[in-house]
Image (cartoon, rainbow, N blue to C red):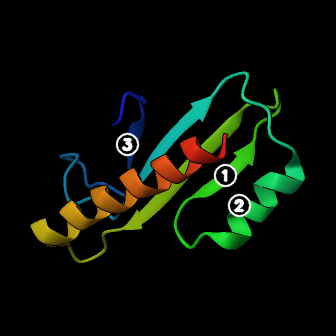
Amino acid sequence: MNGKEYSIYFYGCDSSKKNCTSIQFATYWSGKRLTAESVNQWNADKRFGKLFLDSDGDLNLQMDVNMDYGVTYKNMEDTFDIWKTVLEDVIDTI
């Protein structure tokens, strides 16, 4: 999205790998250094998405989505729009 690669992980899926109960959007930036203080401030200021520094000091972004009992097409469309906005916010920050 916007040239930045990301992954989507599926959780709580049944044996046919369908009917998953949640998904997680995730990406990272290797070599992008932010202080723990600025990461904490970003998390305090934002409702969606979670930033953290991994053990190598790389910046990671995740966003979890509950899908228990299903979601509509429009809801998923909106979820992707939210992820795009969160991703753009981080890119603007770094």
Picture disc at residue 42: 2
Residue 27 screen position, x and y as percent: 52, 37
Side (left or right) of 31 relative to 90: right
Quadrant of residue 65 within the rendered picture: bottom left
Quadrant of residue 35 within the rendered picture: top right
Which residue, as the protein is rendered here, is positioned at the far left?
73
Q: Amino acid at mark 3?
A: Ile
Residue 46 screen position, x and y as percent: 61, 69
Residue 11 visible from this viewpoint:
no
Q: Quadrant of the C terminus?
A: top right
Compute the Cα span from label 3 to label 1: 16 Å
**Residue occupying the point 29% across, 56% down:** 80
Q: Amino acid at mark 2?
A: Trp
Which residue, as the protein is rendered here, is positioned at the far bottom?
69
The residue carrying pointer 3 sits among few (fewer than 14), some (14 to 19) or many (20 or more) residues within 10 Å by Cα, namely few
The answer to the question of whether label 2 and label 1 lie on touching residues, with beta carbons closer than 8 A, is: yes
Compute the Cα span from label 2 to label 1: 7 Å
